[in-house]
Amino acid sequence: MKKAVFFLMIMMSFIGCKEETVKEPDRLIDKEVMQNIIYDLSLLDAIKYNEPATTENYKVNPKEFIYKKYKIDSAQFAQNNIYYASNFEEYKEMYDNVIKRIDSKKAVIDAVLKKEAKRDSLIAKKKELDSIKKAKKVILAKKKDSLQKIKKKDSLLLLKKKPKTVTPTIKSKVIKNGVRID
């Protein structure tokens, strides 16, 4: 973006040296619309440069897209671009406005990305805590199971080894008709 502005400034210095001015095109594009075109072209060029697969996947040619969107052709755009570039101060102001607009959009996008990153980290932390809880539950369940197994073993051992109950036997001597009965 800065290279383009620098190039335009050099180009304007050469154009500014001419005594004759560039005449207004027959189909003049409004200054605000021209700024919108420059803004859109800047975004599309940035996308094409940073993520070339995006424009290739959607088969989008940035300039052709702009021409269709604003219902202009390449000749009309070129004539208007030269016309606005012939007045260096006005053209620089247009680019400054485009840069301000990009910077304000960037600030909004950065804020949104920051919120998303924070949300994503909270979700990841929650998942981690949930997995720790699940692991603790599994460990507790295993401990309970092992305790129940021990209790079962103990109760089975108790059933097998019934204590011998000693019942006192009283031997009494019963004598009936002179005979002792045991």
Image (tube, helix red, strand yellow):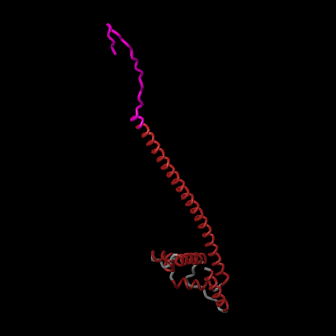
Give the residue drawn at x 45%, y 39%: 151
Report the magenta residues as a range.
Answer: 157-182
Q: Nearer the viewer, residue 91 or 55?
A: 55
- Image label count: 0
Position of 78 with respect to 89 (left or right) is left
Q: Position of residue 163 (x, y in %)?
A: 42, 31
Magenta residue check for 158: yes
Which quadrant does the C terminus fall into? top left
- Residue drawn at 64 percent across, 90 percent down: 15
Figure quadrant of residue 148: top left
Closer to the camera in the image, 112 or 174: 174
Q: Magenta residues: mostly which secondary structure? A: loop
Spot the residue most to the front. Answer: 178
| Residue 19 percent location from the top left of the image | 67, 92
Query: On the image, which quarter does residue 102 sit in?
Result: bottom right
Quarter containing the N terminus? bottom right
Q: Measured from the top left, where is residue 167 in percent x and y?
A: 41, 23
Q: Does 152 sit above or below residue 35?
A: above
In the rendered view, would you say 104 is above or below 162? below
- 75 and 148: which is toward the camera: 148
Assess whether residue 153 is covered by the magenta stretch.
no
Q: Position of residue 175 (x, y in %)?
A: 35, 10
In the rendered view, does 20 fall on the left or right side of 45?
right
